Amino acid sequence: MDELLGSSCPCGSDESYRVCCGPFHRGESQARSAEELMRSRYSAFAHGDADYLFRTWHPRTRPDDVTIDPRITWTGLEVIDSVAGGPDDDRGEVEFKAFFESAGRADSLHERSRFERRAGRWFYLDAREDL
């Protein structure tokens, strides 16, 4: 992962991975909003960081094990809508499209994710994909 630190961040910001989502993945800081957590989770999928995905998944809804399919290449992220999920909220929702390639075919995932803050930290709760 060190070779990726200077590259642009997969979450779509204009920042490098080193200063954008890298600090979250390395445990140096916490997401300040539901959207920031969603973007950092997308970057974790793109970088193959299953440990970060597990750590940021709400304990009530997370699976026993989180794995990342190595046959999927994540190619882009478009945030469509964000509801609540700010510094004064305990819940939030983020709708997005995540673009990927698998088996040489381009595809996308359209999802509205729900997030919950516990003890000052944001966690991914669950998602609705029937949009």
Image: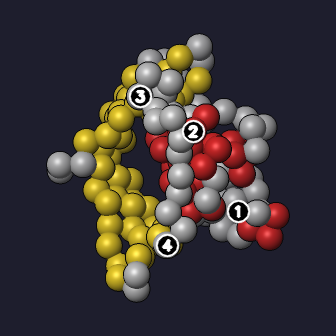
**Residue at mark 3 to residue at mark 1: CA–CA distance:** 31 Å
Q: Give the residue displayed 17% in from the left and 49% down from the top.
A: 130
Residue under label 1 = 16
User: In the image, what residue type sits under mark 1?
Assistant: Ser
- Residue 105 in the image: x percent, y percent? 35, 82
73 vs 109, left or right, is right
User: In the image, what residue type sits under mark 2?
Assistant: Phe
Q: Mark 1 and mark 2 in contact (Cβ < 8 Å)?
A: no
Q: Is residue 1 above or below residue 44?
A: below
Q: Secondary structure at mark 3?
A: loop
Name the mark on residue 61.
Answer: 3
Residue 113 figure quarter:
top left
Sooner in the amino-acid sequence: mark 4 or mark 3: 3
**Residue at mark 3 to residue at mark 2: CA–CA distance:** 11 Å
- Residue 68 in the image: x percent, y percent? 53, 57
Q: Secondary structure at mark 2?
A: helix
Q: Secondary structure at mark 1?
A: loop
Which colour style is shown?
secondary structure
**Residue at mark 2 to residue at mark 4: CA–CA distance:** 20 Å
